[in-house]
Amino acid sequence: MTEKDRIEQEVQECVCEFMHVHEEIVDKVEKAMPGEQELLDLAEFFKVFGDSTRIKILYVLSQSEMCVCDIATLLQMGQSAISHQLRVLKQMRLVNFRRDGKTVFYSLSDDHIQTILAQGMEHITE
């Protein structure tokens, strides 16, 4: 079987053999669907998790509050690259920061972020 045939077969497996809409189910789900803006915001939220450097930063912050210097050392990256990614994470409200003198410490914004990371790890290691 060629690759093209395999893909065609997979597409056929995903298509109903005859058109019949289950209106009760469709109505129920339609009522539960979030609005368009909420879905766009959710998509943006998950895009943040699509970058391995940001995932690494979130993971290390799930272990301990850290400053940029600590994160840069741990990930063997430049401070400016870490700062750039932290700015993205702050904009998406995934990390918090606090100033202690001249040092800024970062931490996960809440337990939800740690849960998302843990569930993602659990999913990929099943």
Image (cartoon, helix red, strand yellow):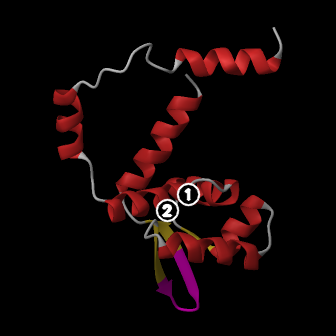
Callout 1 crowding tier (Cα within 10 Å): few <14, some 14–19, many ≥20: few
Q: Amino acid at mark 1?
A: Lys
Residue 91 percent coordinates (x, y): 49, 76
Marks 1 and 2, how far apart at CA: 5 Å
Q: Amino acid at mark 2?
A: Glu
Q: Is residue 113 above or below residue 82?
A: above
Residue 13 percent coordinates (x, y): 54, 15
Q: Which residues are magenta?
A: 99-105
Residue 75 percent coordinates (x, y): 74, 60
What secondary structure do most residues of the magenta stretch adopt? strand
- On screen, residue 68 versus residue 119, left or right, reads right
- Residue 44: which disc? 2
- Quarter of the image for residue 108 reads bottom left
Residue 122 percent coordinates (x, y): 51, 31
- Residue 47: which disc? 1
Instruction: Identify the residue at image location x=73%, y=68%.
Output: 72
Q: Secondary structure at mark 2?
A: helix
Instruction: Identify the residue at image location x=69%, y=72%.
Output: 82
Residues at marks 1 and 2 touching, judged by CB atoms closer than 8 Å: yes
Residue extending farthest top: 1
